[in-house]
Amino acid sequence: MHILIAEDEPSLRENLQWMLEMEGFTVVAASDGLQALEFACLAPPSLVLTDVMMPHLDGYGLVKALRETMATSTVPIIMLTAKADRRDVRMGMNLGADDYLTKPYRRDELLAAVRARLARKASLDETARRLQEEAREAQQRDALTALPGRELFGQRLAVTLKQAPAENLHSIGLVCLGLDGFSKVNDSLGAAVGDKVLYEVACRLGEHMRDARDSLRYDCVARLGSDLFAVCIGENTNLTALEESSAALLQVLAQPYLVDGHTLFLTACAGASLFPMQAADAHGLLLNAETALHHAKPVGPGTVRVFDTAMNLQVARRLQVHNALHAALEQNELQVYYQPQVSIAAGNVVGFEALLRWHHPTLGSVSPAEFIPIAEESGLITRIGAWTMRTAAAQAAQWHAQGHGTFRMAVNLSVRQFLGSDLPGLVRTVLEETGLPPHMLELEVTESLALHSVSSTLATLHACKALGVMLAMDDFGTGYSSLAYLKRYPLDCLKIDQTFVRNITQDIGDAAITRAIVAMAHSFGMSVIAEGVETIEQLDFLRGLGCEEFQGFLFSKPVPAEEAVKCFAGFMPPSAPLWSRP
Ligand code: C2E
Ligand code: MG
Ligand code: MG
């Protein structure tokens, strides 16, 4: 920071320089306008003091040139004029000078003018910087909700965490909130309604934090992605408090949304992490919270998960499985096992469910419950699913050709196979290639299908149905069941999930749900198969409800083809001691 002087009279110049340097300013002195301009271009000064009458380039010329040069266009200029002629002064000011002093000036006069100009310039610079900052921040805000976006939020969080010790803020909780099945809102009611819901979500989070502000030391709400929000809570003293705060946020979001005459029910999942206990910086804290959310989502709508370090191990394991899965198909590491499905009334095998098994040379046996979600996420499921359908259908066709009669071969389908791949085309090709009669192939779909575009999944289901195959709803009762969808899907069969079957004889609630599912399925003209039947008591109970079929360890685990084929022979009449209560 320096002051530039332009004065051709040596004694005046030296005197001026001396007075300013005495006050602590750094001064660069030029003996005419041209030299001053050169100095100014080399290093833009914080202020210019210029004489009017000078050789080569006079004061007016200098003012004009400085104003026209980008780097000096806003530098404060004070003109020093010997003639107290109003015309000279006006000309200087018109050219862009900020102030003038009439020679001879007093020392205090000069210093007051210099200080006033420097202060004004500093305040203008500060305003410009703030406006620039605000403009940049506006760009980093989400256009729909005006909340900070990911980048701005990350920057603010970093600053907050850095200042936390100085501000005596001992812990800060970060909660990531992901709306459950939000795409369904967009798909079924349009993006305009979706936008209003997101706006409402932002308002509710903001209001909730405002209400809680009295007891909080710090709070901030952000929108990290389309249906992903973040809330920062200071101060959360421990993980239990953080979990409670997260649950309270989910409660706020779970209230019905009234948008354009629609009443919508929406839930969210939450993942949370605590600073500084679990992360030392903003990046780590955000990563933890999102990892926790990633773990909450598969558990089901409305789940809260607070980060723990085991989650990171799980992330590493996921990556390992993901990498190994790529080679699994080519290396013939996948195998299909078959679990018999049995008629409860007749006791004979009426079908099989094809279930994948994977044995990796170093990872060992990896459960489908672990690798199927990873295959779904990576998109590999399309190829794996096609291979499974081919293998299972070919196996069924072979058993059929060997004279084992008519039975169903059930194949699990992932939602991903409905989206972006030609599922009816695959089914048609598999049936043609294997020669399996269409009604012997059953496709198992899950309720998560309802979370995606209803019209397109419905069309795909009908196209498959038109080929003559059977359709079953797997794991019924665990997902986002909606009777409305169920009625529209061309289903032949409902599979009651094993979580209900497990406690069916002890838990009145599970028994009631199962009874209701059976009754409803029958009223829709579907048959019911119970999964995971392990005891005779469970089987008897299901028989009492009118459930048609079962599969489970009571009869057989999923087994390789050479074992499974023996089940045809192992026909058990209903009167066999195994099936009746001792
Ligand atoms: P799912 O389709 O509901 O399959 C039934 C699961 O219950 C199987 O687990 C089966 O081994 C298990 N199970 C059968 N009977 C009993 C029983 O009596 N007790 C208990 N505790 N469990 C029983 P598995 O084989 O580990 O498969 C898990 C899930 O992985 C399957 O659930 C299915 O969703 C998925 N999956 C398996 N193979 C495939 C496939 O080829 N494609 C797709 N998309 N998913 C698959
Ligand atoms: Mg299944
Ligand atoms: Mg199932």
Image (cartoon, helix red, strand yellow):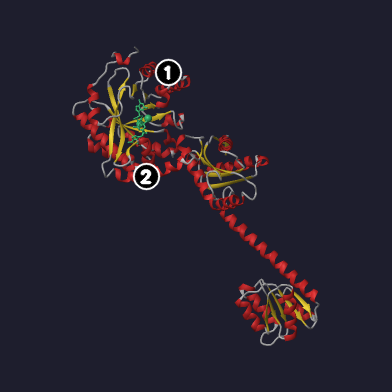
**Within 10 Å of the Cα at label 1, are there few (<14), some (14-19), or many (20+) other Cα atoms?**
some
Instruction: Please tell me which residue lies in front, 555 or 25.
Output: 25
* Quarter of the displayed picture in which ligand 2 can be seen: top left
Can you tell which mark lies on residue 505?
A: 1
Quarter the C terminus occupies? top left
Residue name at image x 34 percent, y 42 percent: 382
Q: Amino acid at mark 2?
A: Gln
- Counting from the top left corner in percent of width and height, residue 116 is at 75, 69
Asked whether mark 2 lies closer than 8 Å to ligand 1, one says no
Can you tell which mark lies on residue 320?
A: 2
Instruction: Please tell me which residue lies in front, 448 or 54.
Output: 54
Q: Is residue 101 above or below residue 452?
A: below
User: Is the Cβ of the residue at disc 1 closer than 8 Å to that at disc 2?
Assistant: no
Can residue 225 be seen?
no
- Counting from the top left corner in percent of width and height, residue 566 is at 22, 25
- Counting from the top left corner in percent of width and height, residue 340 is at 29, 26
Pick out the residue farthest to the left: 402
Q: Amino acid at mark 1?
A: Thr
Instruction: Please tell me which residue lies in front, 66 or 440.
Output: 66
- Counting from the top left corner in percent of width and height, residue 320 is at 37, 44
Which-is-in-front pick, marks 1 and 2?
2
